[in-house]
Amino acid sequence: MKTRLCVAALAVVALVAANSLRAADEKPALKCPVSGKAVDESKTADFNSGKVAFCCGNCPKEFAKNQTKYAAKANLQLVQSGQLKQVKCPLKGKPCAAGKSVEVAGVKVGFCCDGCLAKASKASGDEQISLLFSDTSKGFEAAKK
């Protein structure tokens, strides 16, 4: 009886651990930078060394008209999808320090100092996305394929 309980307990622990590892590897669900809806992978546009996905055929047209307005959310999507990777602090362009990071829309973003971390932590929602992803030139580069 004790053996069965131990085996059952180990099986449960193994399942929980496997699910946790799988969840950690999953990328966040991508959202259309124009509408905020789930994307259709067949509706894309080239942007910042990658392909941004949209929810419908109308959104790429709207995006093309005003890329500046949608750049932060498009860049966030490129980071979420692994097309851009972080290489430095997005605010100052300096190397990131260990333990100085915040999660933004399912993406861990690192910072060089407590000041940058505090600035990013104080912002939220679209303001935070705009602060960190409007200009990717300081902290992000195209991922190698």
Image: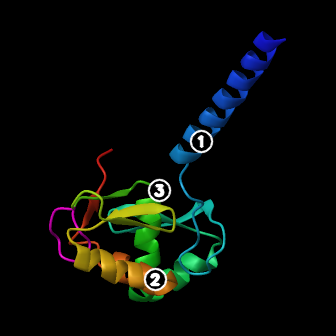
Where does label 3 land, which residue? Answer: 81
> Image quarter for residue 96?
bottom left
Q: Is residue 13 above or below residue 26?
A: above
Three-letter residue code for mark 2? Tyr
The crowd level at tag 3 (other Cα within 10 Å; few <14, some 14-19, many 20+) is some
- Where in the figure is residue 20, as x and y percent of width and height? 59, 41
Please state the horizontal and vertical placement of residue 53, each as a whole percent of the image: 54, 65
Look at mark 1 in the image and give the residue it sits on.
Answer: 20
Q: Is residue 36 something that shows in the picture?
A: yes
Verify whether residue 24 appears in magenta: no
Give the spatial CA distance, label 2 vs label 3.
17 Å
Tell me: residue 133, above or below residue 38. below
Nearer to us of marks 1 and 3 is 1
What is the magenta segment's predominant secondary structure? loop
User: Foreground residue, 130 or 145?
Assistant: 130
Q: Which residue is mark 2?
A: 70
6, 25: nearer the viewer: 6
Region rendered in magenta: 88-96
Dot placed on the residue nearer the N-terminal end, 2 or 3 = 2
Disc 1 vs disc 3: Cβ atoms closer than 8 Å?
no
User: Tag 3's secondary structure?
Assistant: loop
Rendered-image quadrant of the C terminus: top left
The residue drawn where x is 24% and y is 79% is 115
Q: Amino acid at mark 3?
A: Ser
